[in-house]
């Protein structure tokens, strides 16, 4: 993405179009690091000045908060300003419309960069089945389940994603 096309202010004072329009509606969010068991998680919680929490855990708090505010029906031309808890200056700002379209992605040959946000599709892939593949494993009398086959041992273990841990697959949903 061409950084010249991204209109986000990262200095303490607003520059460009945001400063030129004094009647532009503004909304400020306060971000604080999320600490779990005394360790910094790399995530931030975001709150409005009235104390309402927008996003409890966000990797990109400005962009994720903008998506929540647009979904709530806020004016997309509102300037969203982000400050860190305890700070008095604006860390980043931009229009809700533009911020809601962005995320931060790690480049293949360089570090983090702005990228177009694409929502995660929770629907199962076409042709996907929730049924286990392969022959059923038989239990050994007195020992419970059969030991894993050679093929099962060779497969690397896969940890479930956060979404999988929270929500069952669509084919198992009972609605």
Image (cartoon, rainbow, N blue to C red):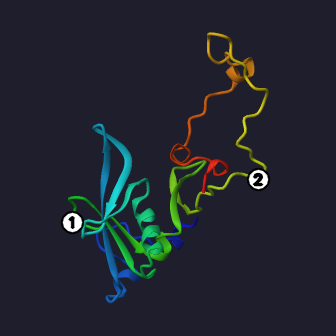
Identify whether 33 is placed above or below 76: above
State the quadrant of the C terminus.
bottom right
Q: Is residue 168 left or right of residue 82?
A: right
* Quarter occupied by residue 149: top right
Q: CA distance from mark 2 to mark 1?
A: 50 Å
Per the rendering, the mark at residue 44 is: none
Question: At numbered mark 2, what does the secondary structure look like: helix, strand or loop?
Answer: loop
Q: Nearer the viewer, residue 109 or 120?
A: 120
Location of residue 51 in the rendering, given as x and y in whole percent from the top left corner: 25, 65
Residue 135 vertical placement versus 108 (above, below): above
Q: Is residue 97 left or right of residue 154?
A: left
Asked if 165 appears above or below 107 in the picture, the reply is above
Q: Residue at x 58, y 47 (%)?
A: 168
Nearer the camera: disc 2 or disc 1: 2
Q: Nearer the viewer, residue 137 or 89?
A: 137
> In the rendering, at what x and y percent does residue 92 appear?
36, 66
Q: Report which residue position mark 1 lands on.
A: 88
Q: Name the residue rendered at 55%, 43% in the picture.
A: 161
Image location (x, y in percent) of residue 140: 68, 12
Horizontal relation, residue 32 to residue 115: left or right? left
The residue carrying pointer 1 sits among few (fewer than 14), some (14 to 19) or many (20 or more) residues within 10 Å by Cα, namely: few
Q: Quadrant of the N terminus?
A: bottom right
Q: Tell me whether circle 2 and circle 1 mark residues in contact (CB < 8 Å).
A: no
Quarter location, residue 78: bottom left
Q: Which circle marks residue 126 in the picture?
A: 2
């Amino acid at each position: 993405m061409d950084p010249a096309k991204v209109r986000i202010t990262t200095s303490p004072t607003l520059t460009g179009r945001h400063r030129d329009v004094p009647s532009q509606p503004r909304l400020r969010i306060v971000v604080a690091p999320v600490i779990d068991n005394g360790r910094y998680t790399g995530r931030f919680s975001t709150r409005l000045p009235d104390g309402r929490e927008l996003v409890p855990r966000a990797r990109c708090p400005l962009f994720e908060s903008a998506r929540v505010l647009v979904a709530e029906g806020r004016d997309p031309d509102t300037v969203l300003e982000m400050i860190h808890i305890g700070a008095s200056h604006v860390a980043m700002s931009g229009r809700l419309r533009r911020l809601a379209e962005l995320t931060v992605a790690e480049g293949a040959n360089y570090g983090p960069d702005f990228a177009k946000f694409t929502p995660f599709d929770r629907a199962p892939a076409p042709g996907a089945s929730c049924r286990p593949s392969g022959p059923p494993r038989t239990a050994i009398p007195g020992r419970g389940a059969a030991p894993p086959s050679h093929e099962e041992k060779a497969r690397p273990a896969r940890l479930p994603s956060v979404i999988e841990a929270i929500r069952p697959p669509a084919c198992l949903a009972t609605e």
